[in-house]
Image (cartoon, rainbow, N blue to C red):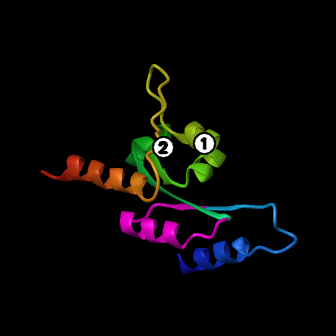
Amino acid sequence: TERREKLCNNLAKKDENTKDEDVLQSDKRFNLDVLKKVDESKPYLYYMGMGISGGETGARYGPSLMPGGSIFAYKTVEKIVLAAAAKSEDGTVCCKYLGRGGSGNYIKMVHNGIEYGD
């Protein structure tokens, strides 16, 4: 994780050679960590947190994806995320952009509370 952070920060350093490039970092973290990362982001460093659910079935047929964070970052990778997500028999994609900050991770936390909280 520390290594990934260092790599992402190095990639995000702007200079004349990279002025038209943007960096997107996404991971599965606790909601408050995502909010901190979003607050620390540079104007050219877009951050997404994404809740992921599905277990073994999701590994075979696609997971339920719950992205949150920068809307620009989501729009940049939307086609990829939608293609990776599970689809119902009627073709409905199991993915929804859930809002800014750590929204996706928060919804995943609520999902886990419902699924396992008995």
Q: In the rendered image, which residue does mark 1 sit on?
A: 78
Which residue is under mark 2? 97
Q: Residues within 10 Å of mark 2 (few under 14, many from 20)?
A: some
- Give the farthest residue toward the right: 17
Magenta stretch: includes residue 38: yes
Count of number-bearing discs: 2
Of the pair 28 and 68, the residue shown nearer to us: 68
| Disc with the residue nearer the chain's start (1 vs 2) | 1
Question: Callout 1: few (<14), some (14-19), or many (20+) C-alpha neighbours within 10 Å?
Answer: some
103 part of magenta stretch: no
Q: In this view, does 85 lie above or below 23?
A: above
Which amino acid, by three-letter code, is at mark 1? Glu
Residue 54 lies, with reference to residue 18, above or below; the image says: above
Residue 72 is left or right of residue 112, and the answer is right
Give, as a three-letter code, the residue at label 2.
Tyr
Q: Position of residue 111 (x, y in %)?
A: 29, 48
Horizontal and vertical percent for residue 52? 43, 50
- Left or right of residue 68, residue 8 in this image: right
Q: Residue 45 carries which label?
A: none
Q: Name the spot of residue 56 as percent of width and height, x first.
A: 41, 46
Q: Which residue is drawn at 70% across and 71% down?
A: 12
Pointers 1 and 2 in contact (C-beta within 8 Å):
yes
Q: Which residues are the magenta region?
A: 25-43
At x 50% / y 69%, what residue is drawn? Answer: 39
Q: Is mark 1 on a helix, strand or loop?
A: helix
Distance Cα–Cα, label 1 vs label 2: 9 Å
